[in-house]
Image: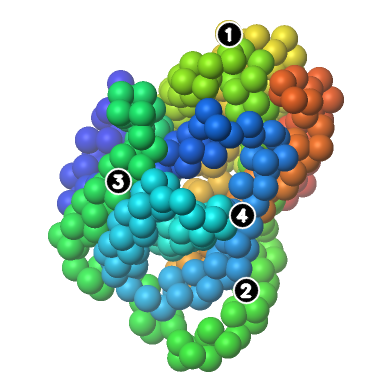
C-alpha cells in the first residue's frame, strides 16, 4: 500500500519518529480522557443529559480555549516546543489524576469541570506545538506526506484510546479508573519527549524580537499581526482554508451532539448499550480518518489541496443528507465513516496549506488561532444543536442545515480556486 510505503519513508527520519511517538501517546491519552468525561457526564445512569446539558458541558470545557489560545500562540513562538511537550504532558498527568479523585468524591460540579478544563487547556499548547514543529523534522518535499500521516495517525490514536476507554469502562465500570489510564499515557508521552534535544523543534531565536513580558502584554497585538500575516496575498489560501475547516468543524460538532442523543435515547434505553453504540460510531469514523490518510496525498497532489477541500465538502453535502435523514443505526454509522473521511481529508489539506504558507515565526500563533476557531465552531454547533434537537435527537431541520453549510463551503472554495489559485 502507498500509505505503508510513505510511512516507511518518513520513519527514516529519527526525529519524526520521536515526534510521532509523542503525538500518538498524547492523543491516545486524549481519547481515553474524553471518553471518560463523556461517559461520566452523558452516560452515567444517574444523569439524564439533554442536548442543552451536553452543549453546556462543551461550552465549559471548550470556550475558555478562546482565552488560552492567543496566549498559547504567543508562547509557542517563544518557548522551546520540546519543553512544551515535556512539561505539558507531565502537568496533564497530574491534573488527570486529580480529575479521577474528584469523580469518586462528593464535590460540586464546577470543581470537576474546572479540573477537566485545566487538562484540556494544556492540550491546546501540545497540539498546536506538534503541528508547528512538524516542518522541523521533515524536509519540504515530504511535508504533505507528513501532514497526511502524522495528524491522521494522532487522530487514529485518539480513536484507539477512546475504544480502549470504552472497553476498560465496561469491564471495571469506573470512569475514574479510565481517567487514571489516560494519566499514565500522558506520563509516557512526557518521557518520550526527553529523547529529543531541547532546541531541536524551534522556534528560531532570531525570529523572536520581543521580550516575553512585552509579548504577553501585547497578546492582542500579536494576534492581529498573525491575522495581518494571513491577509497578505501570498497567505490568502491559508485564510480561506481556515475559514472552510472551521465551518466543517461546526457541521461535525452539530452532528456529534445529534449522534450522542441518538445513542443515549433513540436507539437504546440502557446506558451501557448506548455507550457501546457511541463507541461503534467513533470507531467507524476512525476508519474514515485512516482512509483519508491513504487517499489524500495522491488526491491532493493531483487536484491541489484547495480543490480537494472542495471535493470533501461537496461529498459531505450530498452524502450527509442521504445517510442521516433515515435516523437509523446503519445509515448513521455509514455517515460517521463518510464524515470522518471528508473531515480529516479537508484537515490534512488545510494543515498543508497553512504550514507551507505561514512563516515559522508566525506558525505557533496561526495554529493556536486554528485551534480557537475549531473550538468556537464546535461549541457554537453544540448550542445550535441544543436549540434544534428534540429529546430523542431526531431533527430533519438540523440535517438539512448542515448539508446546506457543506454545500456553501464547496461553492465558496471552488470560486476562490477558480479566481485566485488557478491564476498564480
Q: State which tag comes first along the sequence, 2 or 4.
A: 4
Residue lying at 57% horizontally and 70% vertically, measured from the top left? 70
Tally the numbered discs.
4
Question: What numbered label is drawn on residue 180?
Answer: 3
Find the distance from the CA under tag 1 to the CA under tag 2. 44 Å
Question: What numbered label is drawn on residue 60?
Answer: 4
Nearer the observer: mark 1 or 4; the answer is: 4
Residue lying at 38% horizontally and 84% vertically, measured from the top left? 206
Q: Crowding at label 3, few (<14), some or many (≥20) Cα neighbours within 10 Å?
A: many
Who is closer to the viewer here, 359 or 233?
A: 359
Say above or below: 3 vs 332: below
Find the distance from the CA under tag 1 to the CA under tag 4. 32 Å
Find the distance from the CA under tag 3 to the CA under tag 1. 33 Å
Find the distance from the CA under tag 2 to the CA under tag 4. 23 Å
360 vs 176, left or right, is right
Q: State which tag comes first along the sequence, 1 or 2.
A: 2
Residue lying at 77% horizontally and 29% vertically, measured from the top left? 389
Amino acid at each position: 500500500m502507498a500509505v505503508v510505503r510513505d510511512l516507511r519513508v518518513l520513519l527514516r527520519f529519527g526525529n519524526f519518529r520521536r515526534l510521532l511517538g509523542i503525538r500518538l501517546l498524547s492523543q491516545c491519552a486524549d481519547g481515553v480522557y474524553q471518553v471518560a468525561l463523556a461517559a461520566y457526564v452523558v452516560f452515567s445512569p444517574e444523569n439524564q443529559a439533554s442536548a442543552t446539558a451536553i452543549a453546556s458541558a462543551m461550552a465549559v470545557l471548550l470556550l475558555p480555549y478562546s482565552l488560552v489560545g492567543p496566549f498559547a500562540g504567543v508562547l509557542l513562538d517563544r518557548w522551546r516546543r520540546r519543553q512544551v511537550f515535556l512539561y505539558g504532558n507531565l502537568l496533564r498527568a497530574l491534573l488527570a489524576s486529580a480529575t479521577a479523585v474528584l469523580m469518586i468524591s462528593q464535590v460540586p460540579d464546577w470543581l470537576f469541570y474546572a479540573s477537566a478544563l485545566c487538562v484540556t487547556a494544556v492540550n491546546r499548547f501540545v497540539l498546536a506545538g506538534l503541528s508547528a514543529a512538524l516542518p522541523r523534522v521533515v524536509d519540504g518535499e515530504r511535508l504533505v506526506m507528513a501532514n497526511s500521516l502524522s495528524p491522521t495517525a494522532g487522530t487514529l490514536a485518539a480513536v484507539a484510546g477512546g475504544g480502549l476507554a470504552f472497553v476498560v469502562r465496561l469491564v471495571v465500570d469506573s470512569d475514574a479508573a479510565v481517567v487514571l489510564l489516560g494519566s499514565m499515557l500522558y506520563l509516557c508521552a512526557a518521557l518520550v519527549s526527553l529523547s529529543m534535544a531541547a532546541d531541536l523543534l524551534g522556534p528560531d531565536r532570531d525570529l523572536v524580537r520581543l521580550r516575553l513580558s512585552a509579548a504577553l502584554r501585547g497578546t492582542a497585538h500579536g494576534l492581529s499581526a498573525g491575522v495581518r500575516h494571513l491577509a497578505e496575498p501570498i497567505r490568502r489560501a491559508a485564510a480561506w482554508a481556515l475559514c472552510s475547516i472551521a465551518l466543517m468543524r461546526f457541521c461535525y460538532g452539530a452532528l456529534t451532539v445529534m449522534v450522542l442523543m441518538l445513542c443515549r435515547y433513540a436507539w437504546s434505553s440502557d446506558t451501557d448499550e448506548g455507550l457501546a453504540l457511541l463507541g461503534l460510531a467513533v470507531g467507524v469514523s476512525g476508519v474514515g480518518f485512516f482512509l483519508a490518510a491513504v487517499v489524500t496525498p495522491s488526491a491532493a497532489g493531483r487536484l491541489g489541496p484547495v480543490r480537494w477541500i472542495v471535493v470533501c465538502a461537496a461529498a459531505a453535502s450530498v452524502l450527509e443528507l442521504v445517510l442521516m435523514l433515515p435516523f437509523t443505526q446503519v445509515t448513521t454509522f455509514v455517515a460517521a465513516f463518510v464524515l470522518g473521511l471528508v473531515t480529516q481529508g479537508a484537515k490534512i489539506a488545510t494543515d498543508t496549506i497553512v504550514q507551507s504558507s505561514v512563516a515559522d515565526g508566525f506558525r505557533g500563533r496561526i495554529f493556536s488561532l486554528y485551534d480557537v476557531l475549531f473550538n468556537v465552531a464546535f461549541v457554537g454547533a453544540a448550542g445550535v444543536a441544543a436549540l434544534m434537537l428534540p429529546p430523542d435527537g431526531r431533527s430533519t431541520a438540523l440535517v438539512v442545515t448542515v448539508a446546506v453549510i457543506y454545500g456553501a463551503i464547496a461553492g465558496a472554495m471552488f470560486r476562490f480556486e477558480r479566481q485566485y489559485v488557478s491564476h498564480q
